[in-house]
Amino acid sequence: MANPSKIPESISRRQLIHAGGIAALGLSLPELLFADESRDLLAEQKKSSRKGAPRATSCIFIHQYGGLSQLDSWDPKPNSPSEIRGPYRPIQTATPGFQVCELMPRLATLSEKYAVIRSMSHRNAQHDQANAMMLAGKIEPKKDDPSFGAMVTKLSPSTAKIPPHLWLQKYGGGAAPPEPTYMTGGFLGAKYAPMLIGKTHEDNPASKDFRVRAFDTNAQVTLSQLKSRWNLSQQLDQLAPVGEASEFESHELYQQKSVELLQGSEARRAFDIEKESDAVRDRYGRNPLGQNLVMARRLIESGARLVNVLAWTGLAPKEKFVSVETWDMHGNADVGIFENGWNGLPFALPRADQAVAALLNDLEDRGLLETTLVVLCGEFGRTPKIRKGAKRIGRDHWPNCYSAMIAGGGVRGGVVYGESDKHSAYVQSNPVNLEDFTATLFAAMNISPTSRLSPDGFTIPASNGRVIPELLK
């Protein structure tokens, strides 16, 4: 294939096609169209990026499953009526003119390390569908579309002796997205599926009896047999039709896919959270989110490419488990949105504030923040108007306008992008859809959004979105 950068800029596609110049250059029509598109994107990125700006090589994507209230976090509206603004006051961050909710004091002091988007928007208020959309980075994803994590590990392979793509704390409840949208690699194949750690709400490093069960092997199966099965599955995967998995391909096998995990020590050390000091673990918070973020940092430090973390903040004392949907604060689970319980803001948001702030500081202290993209986002936001739920006061699903935070390598800190209206109900300026959001995340990781995912190299771009230059260094 010819190098797209070598195509003379003075020759247009139409001229080449009319003159029969495609064959002369050794290019097919798809190659030419792709080359032209890639050149345009490269020119756009050069305009919007500073020379030598750092880019992330890894990502920690924190999912606020259920949908965090934008009004009670990143986009407070203190001048709105009480039934809209809620009980919390805004506090000033380290960035002049930028305020956040008083329940986020730690992140407020670190605002120069991250950017906030206040104009995220789509139109789907169903948890499962909205989560599938966020995972694929598309308004209308197909059932076999790969997740962002699968695409990153396909386009930016890792050679570390540790799974490149991991998921900490499984989605749970009836509102979870279909498992194929995040537990497989979609049409890319199972080798890009994440390794799952935490199949139940108790299966997390904050639990006393936590252990990584992925290291457990059937006593009847030897390492030699596992390696043979792995090699066979690799061969069969190569023979499978494009977009299809062979009938012998097993997700369970891929969950234990690295024989090196079972033979070597690197991964075992990465997963051994007991190696961390009590001071570090306390800094993140002794709850599922805090300890999963400690684990995520250890995995990134060991060479993992992308770690997804479900932002389940645990239970208050004497509470019984209901769901890991921490941020779905309707007031329907015996806890009001402004009550101090597992499904309430005064319980969950300070824990998230502590854990995420500790992560940003820890990454920076270890020299990893410039190479690690950190994303904090839910599938949508909450209704501007507070209402009485089935049992308590709450806010309902609201995809029309919500917020997201991004930090780390490639991201310009101290930025607030987009604006909502006076009630944080609708976008007033610079709307950001899921395609644009995902394209920007790719760019922050030095991956071209137009990178092709198909085996032919010319179809199925990673993203059709527009990179937002204001968010990037």
Image (cartoon, grey):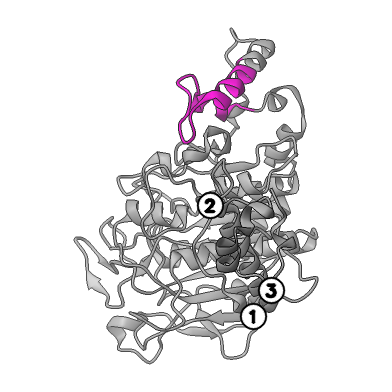
Q: Earlier in the sequence, mark 3 or mark 1?
A: 3
Which amino acid type corresponds to the residue marked 2 in the rendered image? Phe
Q: Nearer the viewer, mark 2 or mark 1?
A: 2
Magenta residues span 229-257
Q: Residue 159 lies in what quarter of the image? A: top right
Please name the residue shown 61% across and 27% down the image: 257
Q: CA distance from mark 3 to mark 1?
A: 40 Å
Which amino acid type corresponds to the residue marked 1 in the rendered image? Gly
Q: Nearer the viewer, mark 3 or mark 1?
A: 3
Is residue 336 at all visible to an observer of this figure?
A: yes
- Residue 265 appears at what percent x and percent y? 77, 29
Label 2: element kind: helix
Q: Earlier in the sequence, mark 2 or mark 3?
A: 3
Q: Residues within 10 Å of mark 2 (few under 14, many from 20)?
A: many
Label 3: element kind: loop
User: Does residue 169 sit above or below 27 in this rendering?
Assistant: above
Please name the residue shown 52% across and 70% down the image: 466
Residue holding disc 2: 148
Residue holding disc 3: 10
Residue holding disc 1: 414
Check the picture and name the quadrant holding the C terminus: bottom right
Please name the residue shown 65% across and 46% down the image: 295
Q: Residues within 10 Å of mark 1 (few under 14, many from 20)?
A: many
